[in-house]
Amino acid sequence: MPTQLEIIADQQRQQHLARNEYNYSDLYSSNNTGALSDGDERGKGELNGNVGSKTDITERKSLVAKNIYNPNFTYDTNNPNAISDGDMKGKGENGTSIGSSVDINERTTLLAKNIYNQNFGYGVVNPNAISDGDEKGKGESIGGTIGSKTDIGERTTLIAKNIYTPNFGYDSNHPNALSTGDEKGKGENGSAIGGLTDINTRVTLVAKNIYDPNFGYGVTNPNAISDGDDKGKGENNTGSVGSVTDINERNTLLAKNIYGNTFEYSSVNPNAVSDGDEKGRGENNTSVGTKTDINERIILKAKNKYGDNKQYPDF
């Protein structure tokens, strides 16, 4: 026996089918007249060489009439309008000619300005690429010069200012690289490391530090162990952990906490179980939730017309 939902669905289906011009005796498909290009606005599928709706066909004919290219005059690489023959249309290579008339004229103008050509090509041996005392060439010459005139002049000026030379090269053993009591060298030299300022600063800081090789800071240092002061916090052999402030704060918090070793909080603690107060919510026999939860549930169930004896849905 059909359900109420099935009866309504069948009624709706019959109403929609009545509006559809296609049916089981005239199914819509690629062969249906409504899908084929037969001169109306509906069908666009190919039929006897025709493709598209009436508007499509009319628009295509209009565009084809404007197009100078056709099956008898196709556009390809050999078409006069694709070849460079002195007009503005074709640009394809034609003998030695490439580009439109504008391209060719522009190329001719640029070549006339360029001093380099097939007989005077630019390369690494071209005079304008070699360092020969002018501003053009910078490549190394046979004489060993590198750079333009300006580069060479600037290099000469800088070298004159540099105290280091091939005979007095700077390296890790150079006096100006070693810690010798001046501000230049910082490299390790015996027991000295750093410039003069570095050494003086280190001496000042070490003098302020209470820790030294004879009183090193570590896990066993008194200032690292919890021994009743505010310095050490590490656990000592009596089980104490934290500074005196930490310990006092912990004791204060523990005094406020009603839960402890003899009254631990867990799923069976009275304050976690639903027993008629506002604390516990955990299931207790058939009771779940706080007192407020239970009362709210009773009120909502009283308002709900569905229940164990009348479940939703009700068809």
Image (cartoon, helix red, strand yellow):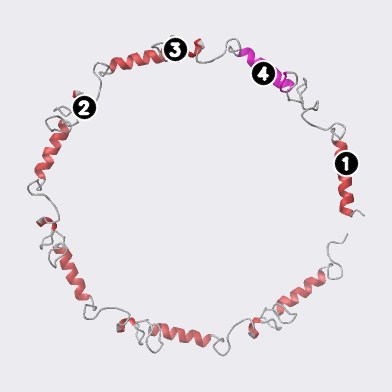
Please state, as top left, top right, bottom left or bottom right, where the N terminus lies in the image.
Answer: bottom right
For disc 4, the marked residue is 60
Q: Amino acid at mark 1?
A: Gln
Distance in Å between CA atoms under marks 3 and 4: 31 Å
In front: label 3 or label 4: 3
Please, what is the three-letter code of the amino acid marked with disc 4?
Answer: Arg
Q: Earlier in the sequence, mark 3 or mark 1?
A: 1
Instruction: Give the Cα distance between marks 4 and 2.
Output: 60 Å
Per the image, the residue denoted by label 1 is 15
Residue 286 lies, with reference to residue 148, above or below; the image says: below
Q: Amino acid at mark 3?
A: Ser
Magenta stretch, overall SS: helix
Identify the mark at residue 84; answer none if there is no mark: 3
Foreground disc of the pair 2, 1: 2
232 or 178, nearer to the observer:
178
Name the residue type under label 2.
Ala
Tell me which numbered mark, 2 or 1, is placed earlier along the sequence: 1
Which residue is drawn at the image coordinates 11% and 49% (left, top)?
169
Q: Which image quarter is the C terminus in?
A: bottom right
Q: Which segment did they paint magenta?
A: 49-66
Q: Decide: is 121 above or below 251.
A: above
Residue 183's x, y, as percent? 13, 59
Give the x, y percent position of residue 187. Answer: 16, 60
Distance between the alpha carbons at the discs numbered 2 and 1: 89 Å
SS under mark 2? helix
